[in-house]
Each structure stands twice: as C-alpha cells, then as structure tokens.
Amino acid sequence: MGHRGRIEQIWGERAPFSPEAPWPERVDEYLVVPDAEVERWVQSACVLCSNGCALDIAVADGRIVGVRGRGSDRVNHGRLGPKGLFGWQANNSGDRLTQPLVRRDGQLQAASWDDAMTAIVERSRHVLTTTGPLGLGFYTTGQLFLEDYYTQALVVRGGIGTPHLDGNTRLCTATAAFALKESFGADGQPGSIEDFDLCDTLFMVGHNAGETHTVLWARILDRLHGPDRPKLIVVDPRQTVAAREADIHLPIRNGTNLALLNAIEHELIEHGWIDEQWIGEHTVGFDKLKEVLAEHPVERAAEVCGVPADDIRAAAQLIGQSKRLVSTCLQGVYQSNQATASAVQVNNIHLLRGMIGKPGCAPFQLNGQPTAQNTRETGANGDLPAALNWQNPSHVARLAEHWNLDPLQIPAWGPPTHVMQIFRYAEEGAIEFLWITGTNPAVSLPELHRIRSILEQERLFVVVSDAFLTETAQLADVVLPAAIWGEKTGTFTNHDRTVHLSEQAVDPPGDARPDMDMFIDFARRLDLRDTDGEPLVKWSTPEECFEHFRALTKGRPVDYTNITYDGLRGGSGIQWKAPRLYTDGNFHTESEETQDYGHDLETGAAFQKLHHAELHAEGKAILKAAHFRPGAEMPDDDYPLRLSTGRTVYHFHTRTKTARAPELQAAAPEPWVELSQHDAEELGIGEGDLVCVASPRGEVRVPARISNVAEGVVFMPFHYGYWDEDAGHEPNGHARAANELTITAWDPVSKQPLFKSGKVRVEKLAEARGAAPAPLTTASAPAEGA
Amino acid sequence: MEKPKLARALRQLDDALVDLADEYRKVGERHATEHDVFHLTHQLAAQCKLQAESLQPHAERYGTELDDPDDEGFWDSLLARLRRLNATAVGRSSTPGLLLLGDLRRLHLAIEETSMLWIVIGQAAKAVRDPELLATVERSQEEMTKQLMWVTTRIKEVAPQVLAA
C-alpha cells in the first residue's frame, strides 16, 4: 500500500483472527530515502497515542528518515497508524527552536543558555524570597519521558517545595487515574492488551477508538471481522467508525453518561446478571449502590439520554450475558459531565460481574498518550510518585527518605494543585512564576480569551520549554528549546502497562536540550540540596534516573522492579509487574497501602483515613454510586445546542507536530463544525456553509459539515489554534479555536476540564464555497443525503 | 398526630435550609471567578432546597405548614448579578483569596448548624417511632456530611495559598 494510502486506509488491510490465534504480524514502514541509504535503526516507540506502538527509527546522515513498526512487539505486532507513520517528520521541521529566547524590550530575542537560565533563576529566587514556594507554578505535559517527569517532580515538589505542579494529562487522563483509585485503591490499568483478543463482548463508552487509537482499533476490527466475532456496544453522540461496526450504538446526548450507566447496572441487578458470590467476597458498597440504582430505571435514562429504552435494555442484556467482557472509556467520559462518577460505573459493571483480573475480562480506563501514564506514576501531576498517598504520613516519610529530604519539605497538606487552579492563582497574582513544559495552554485550555489574558499579564513571569514557538511560547518571557522524542533516551508506559525504551537516534537541533537536563541545571543553579547538603538531583543520565524511580516503586501498587534498561534494550515492550493485575481478587484498598482514601463522587469532598477505614474495604474493591444530575450549563433559548469538542485521526493535541507532517496536515488542514442533518435543516445551513458558533464565552467562524452527530449536539475538533495564521497566538479578526467557546468548569473529583459540555448557538454567515475541510474517512464523514 | 414542639423544630430546620441555600448562592456569586465554587455552591443550594421540600409532608402530619420558598424575585436576581459582576471586577486582585477563606468558614458554620438540626429531628423521629421521617433524616444527614466534607476540603486547599504565600 502506498504511503498516501495510509491516510485513506487508516487501519490498513484486514487480518481477521480468532481468540485462539495471535494477531497476525504486519510490519508498517515509511521511509523518505531508499532502504539502502538507512545507516541504522534505533529502538523506540510511538508517542502519539496511548497504544504506544513499538517502532524503530531509521537514521541517515544524522537525520531521522523514517520509521518501521516492530513485528515482535506485544502491543502493535508491527503496525503503525497514520500519526506514527508520518508524525516524526516534525522533528526535521525547519522551524524548530534551536536556541533560547529571552524577552527584551517586548520582543523575544535569541540568547545563550547561560543568559536564559540566569533570567529564570533570578526570577525564581526573587519569588522564593518574597512570596515563598507557593508563588511558583509548573505546568508540564504528557509528552516527555518518565525520566523527565520524575526529575521534574523531585525538583519541584522536593526541591522548591510547591504543590503547584500539574501535567496536561489533567486534560485527558486525570479521570482515568481517579476512577482506578476510587474503585481499586490505586492507579494502574488492570488488564492486558490481549484481553481485546479474548473477549466475547466489547463495551466502548465515549471512546472514538478508530481515530484516537488506530492500531488498537485495527486489532479490534480484525477480531470483529474474524471468526467468533465479539459483540460490540458503542456509546457515543457521534457515528464514529466504531459505532458503524457496533451491534448496538447508543447515540446519547453528551453529558448523560451517568444516567445511562446507572440504568445498565440497574438492569444487570434486576435480571440477576451479576456474580453475587464474587461481589460478596471481593467488594464493599453493594447495598448502597443498589439503593442509588433503584432510582435509575431504564425509562428514566431513555428520556435523559435521548435513546430508546429498548436499546438500553438490549445493551444491558449483551453485557449481562457476556462471558468475557472488555470495556473502554475515553474522553467522552473523562471530559464530560460527572466524569469520575461515570468512569467508576464502568468499573462497577466489571465488579458486579466479577469480570476483572481474568483473561478477556477488564475495564480499560484508557489514556491519550503513552507518556501520560508516566506523569501520573512519577508524581508530575495529581499524585505523589510511585502511587504514594499524600494523606498518609508514612508514605510521605518514605518519599522524603528516598529523596533524602525532611518530610516537612514535601507539600502534602493538600492534593497536588490542578492546572485550572494554578491558572486561577496566576490570575489573581498569587502565582508570579509559571514554567510551562512542552504544552500549549493558549490553545488547549477552556475559555481561551481568559487564558491568554492570564499569560499576558506583566506581573506573571512565564517560561516555556518547547520544540516549537507555539501560541503559548509566543507569550513567554523566556523560551527554552527542547530536545524531543528521537533526540534523547527514556522510557514510557502505554495503556496496558507496557514499558518501552526509546533511544536517542539523532542529535537535537542546534542548542536544544532534553527537559531532564534543563531541570537538573535549574536545580544546580538554584543550589537545591538534600538534608546532608549534597546536590538534590543525584543523577545525570536517564538510566540512573530510571533506577532511582524504580527503587522507589518497590512493593508499591505501581511496581517497576521487573523493568530495567538492559531488559528493554534489544528486546521490546515489557509490562510492569504482571500481565494482569488483581488476578486474585485482592485490591489496593488496605488503608495503610492505598494510594488514595477516595472522594465523594458528587462534590469531590476528599475522604480522610477515618472515612476510608469505615468502608472496611481491606483489600476489597469499592463499589461507588452517584445520582445523575444535569450539567452546570444546559441548552436554553439563546444557546439551544450542546457543544462537544474532540479529536480527528490526523492530528495530535494542538497540531504542533502533526501540522508539520505534510500528509497529516493535508488530510485535515482547517477546522470545521459538525451539525446533525435535523439541526442543519432547522437552521437553514448546508454542507460547507460558513457559520458562526457562539457560546457565552466567545465565538468562532468555521465551515459546517453535516454529519451523523446526534441531534442537538454540535461537534468541533479542538486541534486548531493560530500559530500558522497571521496573528500567531490569538485570533486575527475571526477566531477558529474550539476552546474560545468552552466553559471553565471541571469534574469535582478528577478536576478534569469538561470540554464536552456547555451550550452554543449556530448561525449561517455565508454560502458554501465547497465542502467543509473535514475528513471523509471518519466520524466527520457527511451524513447520507446531506 | 399533632406535636407542636416537633412541628416548631421542623419549621426551624426548614428556615435553616432555606437560609443555607441562600448563603450557598451568595457565596457562589461573590466568588464567581472561582469556577468550581460557583458551580458547586449552586448545586448544593439546590440540594438544600430539595431537603426543605422533603420536610413538607412530615410537617403536615405534625400539624404545621412550611413557608413556600419564594422563587428568586427581580431584586434578588439583580443583586445576584451585581455580586457576580463585582467578583469579576476584583478577580485580578489578591484579596479574593482571603474573602473566600472567610466566606467558606462562615458557610461551614451554617452547614454545621443545619446538620445539627437534622440530628435533633432524627432523635425526635426515633422517639415518636416515625420510620418515614427517619428515612428522610437519614438521607439528608448523609448529604449534610458530604457538604461538610466538601467545605472542609476546599478550606484546606485555600488556606495555605492565602496565608503562607
């Protein structure tokens, strides 16, 4: 198949297989030079979705010239998706940042590393002296390696001693982490990717797998097209590629997941499709759950969700009569109303049926990127490293001992601050120094005019380390050029706990440096020291850093002791700990061991040790219940439609990399908005018409695609910002970023922003000059007859 | 079955719930730039209102009537708008943190007071052997416990930034 073909044929050719046989190997490759010119192949894996497909990087003449899937790897069996095949070209892009920039006389100007770091250190020292550690904030990414994050966690939490460190993983996988902690007592995916091969029923909730996890979807598709096809139930307001393959598609209104899931559990209990003995032996909370579910019959859900009651019953029956059930959740759950409460209900379904820790049986609280799991595990976002519990003094002491610090130095008086709160502190002037690493809040956070105005404040000193001059970097006081994937060595962990080693293949461009090195340099210049007066950071290489982290995880729920660089090198991906977790039905819910004492799902109130002990979980999983309630902002006369933002298969995050890969950029060059046929007719809007989408926060102008999105729901891809337009970091006259519209609101437990909520209205501005620039291959395909 | 003193206690609880709902809304509006506080206080105000409504049938049985909670009138809604606008206007100054801490502490006291009134009614319900009232009490007490935990959680988050920075 030609390279262009893999833009059209996103999942490649079918290789149907049955549960008895392994998924057939197929090695995907994209090279921009003839094979013979490749000088060496360097072991790595893809960082552009949480499947984390193993690949080798082709190098010629000191440059990356292509990639090839690793046939022997357990995750992808050689396959790569379009982003994996083409996305690496961003590394070679001519507009990489190659030297530090410092703002002088209002302009960002080239500077030496020494000048840039001196500016950063002087300002940090000043804030530390005048305000203290709480005046500094750090917003990191989901795109670094484990070693970068762990170094950052040590320097920020241990060295500086501020709780204000979060990752952009808060926007995509925070709810996954919290759902796992609430139900099972600790982070860590319970299942193995082989469970997709072995299941007889697959329940996908808010997971547009065909676009977000293309190689995982290819695997599922090969099972769906093979003998002994599993049943497929898809919950999604859009007609995604998965929905088209489904036995039952439930196109619910966005914001109503909990109503639907409660009704499904209600049915499971009513029909006795539950394993009462297993529930008795391995769970607590069943009576309370039953009490809450009693108020959520199918008819009520049908009305709230806008789908037929019989379809919900049929879905519950398939789930209830399955023998091996795999479920998946993604942003349709995590970024939607009652996010954690809903994700937890998917865990509950597995607990009610005793379907966890067994072959073919697992809930997958999926992630966006393979490198996202590591922000969680290393303590660079809402947790302490190694699944340690910030509320447990003996856990804090263990961390302090490992870091050779006084336990009081570690900010454990409250949960690590989430990004929306960090920006709020910056807004009110409480945070005066903000270091943003490899992420682009000026496009990715909700309500962009607010975010831009916070970053633009004179009194806020903003440092941005990135590979490119993003919208956010353009607002910085100091910009540091970062080495990225392929230009440094490190590890990362995919959504079934498979750890890959990614070796340095080429030198970084110009003076760009790995983020780990930047933080070590920062700590050295700030003279951060441990209790013995020795330098705080004890390592200088990624492998030394990994070993330090690995030692900390020993015996913890997130346990890396079976992984070493030597074990990974020359081999391929290895899962940490075991193929499956919880095979003995024992969970991490002993009060002394647990990572989190849990939360009230409706208010986010944090439980303390006492409340946790009262549950008497002691190794049993926790069934948690919550009543459905409508979202904070419901459609009304002025704004009658529901907004949902999301992804397209060809782009990653804010297109910083993917727009610099010509094939990917050409496949989805401009933003669009999707309307249902019904709503389009009501509004007199046709395919390709230029429309204004307005919310109480702002408005954008984009062409309309009439797609199979649910009636009353409006969908926009969130990838498109302004760096490749004239104004650079903000709208030039007409805005186009979906986050101009989104509401500043977040889930009370996971603090994940609710991008898939909020109200909008749509008005036609001008006649079409052709079809909307939306891909035809995916959920954004035109509706039939439109 | 008329019980004038129990009826009076029910009216007292009803008043407390209506006041608490009002307090929640005011705190939310005063701190409209703290988006989680804004959304949750309105959610919890609605919860208090539902609790007050759940008292109605019991009050009738014990021989009293509860005030109909007024819908938000013109002046109330105008004042609410002003509080929100003021919150936006001072949102960039460093005082809102301290104000928030104070408001949350006062809210904590109001929740405690209402919670205690539920305990009082619960004790009476046991003594008069009224399982229906007791069921109402138990459900509401559980909600009040969560409300107290929420406000405590939020105060613990706010305090360090306001006082130590």
Image: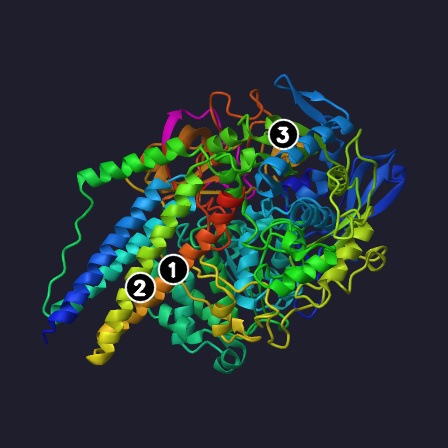
| Side of A656 relative to A32 (left or right) | left
Disc 2 is placed on an element classified as: helix
Q: Amino acid at mark 1?
A: Leu
Q: Which mark is residue B115?
A: 2
Among the 4 quarters of the image, the one containing residue A114: top right
Among the 4 quarters of the image, the one containing residue A407: bottom right
How far, Cα to Cα, is label 3 from label 2? 50 Å
Subunit that carries the residue with mark 2 = B
Q: Which residues are magenta?
A: A763-782
**Mark 1 or 3, closer to the camera:** 1
Look at the magenta stretch and give its main secondary structure.
loop
On the image, the x and y values in percent for residue A227 come to 62, 66
Q: Which residue position holds label 1? A: B148
Q: Earlier in the sequence, mark 2 or mark 1?
A: 2
Q: Amino acid at mark 3?
A: Ala
On the image, the x and y values in percent for residue A616 come to 50, 76
Subunit that carries the residue with mark 3 = A
Residue at point 40% right, 64% down? A262
Residue at point 74% right, 49% down? A147
Res A77 seen here: no
- Judging from the image, the colouring scheme is rainbow
How far, Cα to Cα, is label 1 from label 3? 42 Å
- Labels 1 and 3 in the same subunit: no
| Residue A297, placed above or below residue A779 | below
Q: Amino acid at mark 2?
A: Ser
Which residue extends farthest top? A105
Res A483 seen here: yes
Disc 3 is placed on an element classified as: helix
Q: Which residue position holds label 3? A: A473
